[in-house]
Amino acid sequence: MNYSCELKKTYTADVLVVGGGPAGFAAAVAAARNGAKTLLIEQNSVLGGMATVGLVGPFMTCYDNDCTEQVVKGIFDELCLRAEAKGGAIHPSKISGMCSYNSYYVRSHEHVTPYQSEILAVVMDEMVREAGVKILFETRLADVVSENGKISHVVVLMKEGLAAIEAKCYIDCTGNADVAAHAGVPTWSGDKQTGVMQPCTLFFEVGNVDRDAYMAELEANRDRLDNHMGNCYSWTIEKAKENGDWNLDKNEIGMYEQNIPGRWKVNTTRMSYVDATNTEQVTAAMMEGRRQVQEVLAFMRKYLPGCENVQLLQVAPALGVRETRHIVGKYELNTQDVLEHRIFEDAVCTFAYALDIHHSEGGGVTFTLVDRYYTIPYRSLLPENCGNLLVAGRCICGSSEASGSYRVMPACMATGQAAGTAAAIAAEQCISPEAVPIGRLQQTLVAQGAVIKSE
């Protein structure tokens, strides 16, 4: 079947950011603050992606592995501070030890950032508007038109119908590398050998928890938790399994308190072998996720101290996706880079979250700590064969295992800020992103709050 139509509506910009999740939010703010006429399109009606529509939280650690130095700052830190000022978050510097905010994990979970998703969305709105970003909500990527190794237009579906957007530089912050894939950039999904991707989760929020009773049980079992190697309330889950009250492929309850006492984000459902670039599979996973939410609630009311009268506040309207496509880029960040303190000459950000690999079978997690911290090279944001495209967020060029660290939201914002800054420089100088002087890019990022370690 062939279909053609005339696109009557066209937008132009210096920089087009596709996707308004953590990476896209930071990319748009950075590009606009650095002088680029910036357009941001988002398929939902709110910025934040997984942090808002997905109800995912808290932000995982933005500190080094020694828990002594904050290594992600810049736009991410500004967001945390501004959300805290509105009463919607707690700055990560104030969260340490085994506590309700990190679900009693310590390893790579000190200095997390608890937040309320609805307040975070308001702060993101404020920051993009103040930067001068033009935003189009309810606007979905439909296609990409490429000529001579570059993107000439992005085709989007709006309320009014199909429209075209032309920019000097494009940034793919879709999480799934959708722009890159449409533009013909080679990608792979999940593990290169097996194609298996990390399982998905459907987050939900609960209230009316007697936090004293809930936490007393955890305090009494601190020795079982063992700094993340043990599983929160796993001993209770074993009882429920014996009684036929737990049928999920997950061995723990992940409950993260927000800055409202007794209100928690719950990370417990698990849907494996889901390709989140496939509409039918996403549909099935969402329905299964909602079913699992009800099973978890029944378990909480029957087995967890303090949760006898737990109230379901909301279920995420979007699937929590850990992994889909990875682009083939100028450099593939690998496991050794992440674990062994790799410092790149073209580094654009620093990170230190552990390799956090959720298994598709057996209900477990492999959690491997990094050595102090590592850096992410600019080359990993550059696709192999598209001259005016940058990629930020979890779909940059990196191995499936390495992405178990940098897929989390502080790192996505850090790569987003780097991509937005680079795109603004490229647009200003009428050069390709690959030709952006790395020294100028690094100096600009550091001057605007980013942390780029050199040793």
Image: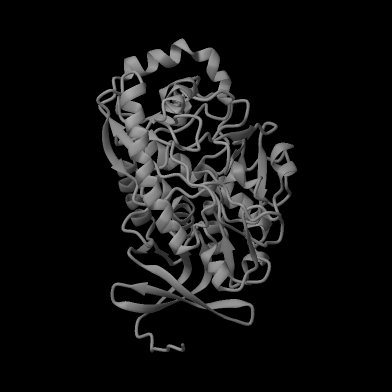
Q: Residue furthest top?
A: 220
Residue 31 vs 58, above or below: the answer is below
Name the residue at 43% across, 52% down: 285
Name the residue at 58% across, 35% down: 365
Residue 270 shows in the view: yes
Quadrant hosting residue 219: top left
Name the residue at 37% across, 53% down: 47
Residue 194 vs 270, above or below: the answer is below
x, y percent for residue 162: 36, 79
Give the camera-side residue of 56 and 196. Answer: 196
x, y percent for residue 148: 63, 82
Report the side of 243 relative to 147 (left or right): left
Quadrant hosting residue 291: top left
Give the camera-side residue of 28 and 7. Answer: 7
x, y percent for residue 276: 49, 57
x, y percent for residue 408: 53, 43
Figure coloring: one colour
Residue 426 shows in the view: no
Residue 17 vs 314, above or below: the answer is below
Quadrant hosting residue 438: bottom right
Name the residue at 33% across, 52% down: 125
Counting the numbered discs, the total is 0
- Quadrant assignment for the C terminus: top right
